Structures are given as C-alpha cells and as structure tokens.
Image (cartoon, helix red, strand yellow):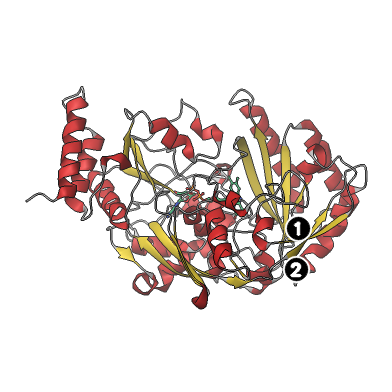
Amino acid sequence: MMSSCKYVLFLFAVLLSASSSTISISVQQNFVQCLSVNSQLSIPSSTFYTRNTSSFSSILLSTAQNLRFTDPSLPKPEFIFTPLQESHVQAAVICSKKLGIHMRVRSGGHDFEGLSYVSEIETPFIVVDISKLRSITIDIDDNSAWVQSGATTGEVYYRIAEKSNIHGFPASSCTSLGIGGLITGGSIGFMMRKYGLSADNVLDARIVEVHGRILDRAVMGEDLFWAIRGGGGGSFGIILSWKIKLVPVPPTVTVFTINKTIEQGATKLFHRWQQVAHTLDEDLFLSFLSSGQFKSKWKQNCTEHIHRPVSWWRWSTPSSNAGEGLYPIASPPQILLQRQNIYKNYFKSKSDFVKEPIPETVLEGIWKRFLEEENPTMVLSPYGGMMSKISESEIPFPHRKGNIFEIFYTTGWQDGDQNEKKHVEWMRELYEYMAPYVSKSPRAAYVNYRDLDLGMNKKSNTSFIDARAWGEKYFKGNFKRLVRVKTKVDSGNFFRHEQSIPPLPLGG
Ligand SMILES: Cc1cc2nc3c(=O)[nH]c(=O)nc-3n(C[C@H](O)[C@H](O)[C@H](O)COP(=O)(O)OP(=O)(O)OC[C@H]3O[C@@H](n4cnc5c(N)ncnc54)[C@H](O)[C@@H]3O)c2cc1C
C-alpha cells in the first residue's frame, strides 16, 4: 500500500504534470517522483517551489545577500526544495544524482559570489535550501551544542545567552550568517584571538554524503572530518548539523575601539595599531577597524578610545555607532533572532593577509582611492593569539602564524548593475595596488570571502591544475590533502561549483 507520504508526493507529481503544457516529463516531475520512492518521511508539497509557484522569487531572494546575483538575466534554478527533515536531504541527494540534475546547497545565502543560489557554468540546476532545518540543542553541562545548518549565528548566540551568560561560541561578527556554510570555510570573528575559528571549535558533524547516507564523525573518519572544517562549502556533502564546543566568557567584556577621522591623524593611529594589535594575546575580543567608517561615519568629534562593558554577544553585532554593536546598544537580545541582514546591497569583495606593517604612505594611498569610491570599506582583523598557536595543517584553513592581520575589502552600491563595472574595476585596482604589501607566493585569501577573480572550475570537468590557482591561495599546502579527500569521498564530482575542490582524474 502506498504510504501517506508517497501519496502526497504522487498527487503533487500528477498535479504538476497536469499543469504542464509540454508532453515531456519535466525535471521537477521526475524529481518529485524520485523523492516519493526514496524518502521514508512525508514530504509536503509546500517544500517544493517551482518557477510557477507564486512565492518562487521571494523564496529565492529571501536569503540572497549579494543583490548582484539576483539579476533577472542570470540563470534561475528549475525549482527550490526546502527539506524539513534530515531524510528529505538524503532523498534530494539520491534523486539529484540519479536524475543527473546539478544541485546547489544553501544555508544562509551569504556566499559573496552567489554560488549557493546561482549556477552560471551549469544549467539546469536546482537549489536545496536547508534554512528550515535550524534546531539548536544546548547542553550546558557538556559545554556543547548541536546546531542544524540552517540556524543563523544570531540564533546560536541567542540560544546560548538564554541558558548562560558565561558561555559563548566564537563565530562571525554578523548575525544573519548560516552556520552551515559559515563553518565549512572556517569562520573568523570577534573571539578568534582567544579561541580560534568556529571550525577550530567543532566536536562532531552530521553530513549527507554522495550516496545519500548520513555520516557522523566516527563513521566519516578523520580525513573527511578534517576537510569539512574549513575546506569550503559545497565540495564534500551537505552538512546537516555541527556539534560545537561552548567556550567560557566573562559576563561582560570591554570593547576597545580606535575612533579618529583622517584629519585627526587616523592614518598614524592605523600605522601604530598594526604593529601592536596582533601581540595583544590576552584580548578576548577583536577591534575591527574600518576605513570606510572614517569617511562616512567617524566624522564626529570622537574620543580616541572607547572602553565599554557589554555582553559578549552584543559585540558580535556591529553598529551604526562606532564602539557599539550592529544594532543600537539598547536593543533587546531578541534582535539576534532577526534572520535578515539589514544591509543587503550589491557588492564586490576581496581579502588579503598582511605579514609586515603597511607603510604610512601606502595607507595614505588607500585613503586617496577611498575618496574616489562611493561606499568602500576595509576591515582589518588582527591575528596572533590563538590563531598563531594552531598549526597550519590542523584544519584546511591555513592562515595562522606570521599573519599580523587580515584585510577584508568591500565596495557596495545600490543602483543595480548600471555602474557595476566601475565599482568592480575600482576594487580590482585597489587589490593590485596592495600587492607589494601583502602575503606572497601565494597571495593568500580567505575562502569564506569568495572571489571568483582568483579562478574558476569549468563546468563539471574540473582540473586540478586550474583549481590550484585559487585553491592554494585559500588553503596553501592543505589544498593537496583536500583534493585527496575529495577523490576518496566524491570521485564523480557530484558536489561541485565554480570553486569546489576537484577530484583527481581516474588513475591520476
Ligand atoms: C554580510 C556578511 C557578513 C559576513 N561576515 C562574516 C564574518 O564575520 N566572518 C566570516 O568568517 N565570514 C563572514 N562572511 C562570509 C561568510 O562566512 C560566507 O559567505 C559563508 O559561506 C556564509 O555561509 P551561509 O550559509 O550564510 O552562505 P551560503 O551562501 O548558504 O553558502 C556558502 C557556501 O557554502 C555552501 N553550503 C551552504 N550550506 C552548506 C551545507 N549545509 N553543507 C555544505 N555546504 C554548504 C554553499 O553551497 C556555498 O558554496 C560574511 C558574509 C556576508 C555577506
């Protein structure tokens, strides 16, 4: 007898075929039929958004952060599937593979190049959006939590703070990020000098691998467990959940911010700051310096240092006022549950690692370039501390000892694609200008600040040699081990995108 779940899906497939004007069986009909055969739990039709569904666009755009990749001219998925259970994800992998449908996976939608919801190199494609899998189970006695991939960092911070004011988790400084995609790339944030990356604080994981099986750490083995903690999203499988280690934090912390305009000598302060920031090992929290703010926000007559006691999670939320968080200081903690990034825009970003202090004249040159662009920002994140104590090969994220800080460059705009070329060129020129003053051979980059200018795979036919161009920038010597793991767990390259880890060719 047909189970109720299969009956729902069967009906849905019949409805789809009835509404179709073509005789050929469409991608989505095949997929729905396949799901009905391969899932043990009911899959409601409301989890499935075809291009004919009225909410298709709003679901597609709901978490897409970079508006550049929401342009109507770009390829759209055949449909979006939003699993409600782990077994739905398993069935999605089995069916995409069986039917040869290219798949993209999305947790929080913050990929800088939109790779979780746009495939320009391979069509047709579907999006498996796991934002509805977002339960968080905190075990304070065990100092740990299981977090499903669709949860945001804000939700994680909130649920921890709800249970304890002396436990925290080192993760991103922006609270709308999906924990699924974030930890796959490492995840830097305001506690990294004290505790390292989020990926350094992962105890276990559940992943759907290429045959649709769910593996935890014990079953997947240490090679794959190593690769998924920093080797980048979308290469090895679909992470269902992470078991994270909670770390001790004081009930309140002191926030330290340098706050000067250019006229008040900001360049000099910057210069001094880069010589000492990475040596302040005991500092619990990062001071982010943003040159963009000099231009737009730090024009007021501010004091040089702001010391302010705040709850640890509050500092995770950068604000419109320097020295506070993203939201006004009086905001209730429930603001962390707001899953949306309130500053969505069109943007192009890049990253660099700095090993020697940047000369003052170069800082002045950056400033001149900033004056030519409407909304530029450069965030300097000091390394040192725990980041220097962890070995380069502990996990795939290799940017450890010897880096004094990381640069995140970004330029944002709101007027669509009209002036996109101009803004992107501006960013590329600034990157070129910085080349002599940042890491070399390779010029390193952070995989979570994805930059397709560094290189791209060609369709499913990826080449190890091509991928080395950007793979060694993101992962240095760890790239080769990532390729070996990929070859072992997904030799057919099912999980792929423009910058996924390639397997070695057969016999290679
Ligand atoms: C506004 C903003 C602020 C940011 N702030 C920080 C910060 O403070 N620190 C930091 O380190 N980074 C930061 N980032 C970068 C961020 O870490 C990456 O964009 C990260 O990939 C986001 O994860 P996501 O799940 O939201 O993105 P998605 O776009 O959903 O996914 C990103 C990549 O991971 C893959 N992926 C997604 N979910 C899964 C899964 N469950 N299993 C396997 N692969 C998956 C996707 O296919 C894609 O390739 C920021 C980005 C933005 C836009």
Q: Badge 1 is on which residue?
A: 287
Amino acid marked by disc 1: Ser
Please report the residue visible at 26 percent of the width from the left and 40 percent of the height from the top: 45
Please state which of residues 194 and 453 is positioned toward the viewer in this rendering: 194
Q: Is residue 360 left or right of residue 277?
A: right
Please say whether residue 440 is visible from this viewpoint: no
Looking at the rendering, which quadrant does residue 367 occupy? top right
Task: Tell which of 329 and 87 is nearer to you.
Answer: 329
Where is residue 291? Give x, y as percent: 78, 45
Nearest to the observer: residue 467 or residue 98:
98
Task: Indicate left or right for 359 with 402 as reference.
Answer: right
Which image quarter: residue 7? top left
Tell me the crowding category of disc 2: few under 14, some 14 to 19, or many 20 or more residues within 10 angstroms, Cα based. some
Mark linked to residue 283: 2
Disc 1 to disc 2: CB gap under 8 Å = yes
The percent coordinates of residue 12 (x first, y second) are 20, 37
Q: Position of residue 125 (x, y in %)?
A: 35, 38
Disc 2 residue: CB within 8 Å of ligand 1: no
Residue at 56% across, 68% down: 200
